[in-house]
Amino acid sequence: MAFITTPDGIRLHYQIDGPAGAPVLVLSNSLGTTLDMWAPQLAAFGQHYRVLRYDTRGHGGSDAPAGPYRFEQLGRDVLALLDALDIERAHFCGISMGGLTGLWLGVNAGHRLDKLVVCNSAAKIGNAEGWHERAALVRKEGMAGVAAGAAGRWFTPAFAASSLLQVLTLVEGLATSPAEGYAACCDALADSDLREAIFGIVRPTLLVAGSADPVTTVDDARFIAERIAGSRVVELPASHLSNVEAVGGFNEAVLAFLAN
């Protein structure tokens, strides 16, 4: 396993694949998942890009210090990873929480990005009360309750029924996630609101949305697109984890955007 240490002393787990010398594409995971969630993209993306996956702090093999976290920390973790690997600029693709990290980078460190892909995300995800309640529940009772309802949030019923093993694997990963890391990221989501700041993003941006996503809707993606000049929305037949549920369409849309 490969790690870097951030300036504030957090070890981040990462993995890099693909041809040496190719443009770098950073992939950022959703809340309660790990870098393994990008397995459906690895073969396709790795033909053209140096694919850099990492576990957001509080997740997977990365450290899970006590929270609360802030999106400034999550964004600066990405910058620390790029610095440690001597990567001046990269494409960035994040889903849900990872997409909000991408928006933070677009606002605050656009000079480090080439193109930005924001998937199943929003400039403000949910409301502060709901996130604080979820954080408190997880800190008190652990991850079982959150994991029990995850399949219904992440996938359509049809996909959950037809791809049961894949869904169960992701849900089990959520159930075994560090409770404090998850809760601390809920705190970050509670406090993050980039609805006005995204007007400042100037990097070419693609918004990917799931037509059946109950968490971050197509309208959330369109809201972002209206505020980032030149950006556009691709809608896929999927729920919240569109990279898993609509692999072919997701890969095609992202690769076409990055290539043009």
Image (spheres, grey):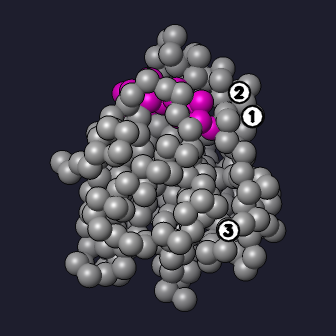
Residue interval drawn in magenta? 170-189
Mark 3 and mark 2 in contact? Answer it, CB < 8 Å. Answer: no
Let me know if residue 187 is in the magenta part: yes
Q: Residue at x 34, y 61 (%)?
A: 83
Q: SS for tag 2?
A: helix
Q: Is 159 left or right of 14, judged from the image as shown?
A: right
Q: Main secondary structure of the magenta part?
A: helix
**Camera sees residue 248:** no
Q: Amino acid at mark 1?
A: Asn
Q: Residue at x 33, y 38 (%)?
A: 10
Q: Any mark on residue 33, and which?
A: none
Q: Amino acid at mark 3?
A: Ile
Mark 1 and mark 3 in contact? Answer it, CB < 8 Å. Answer: no
Task: Determine the image quadrant of residue 16.
Answer: bottom left
Sequence-wise, the earlier of marks 1 and 3 is: 1
**Residue behind mark 2:** 130
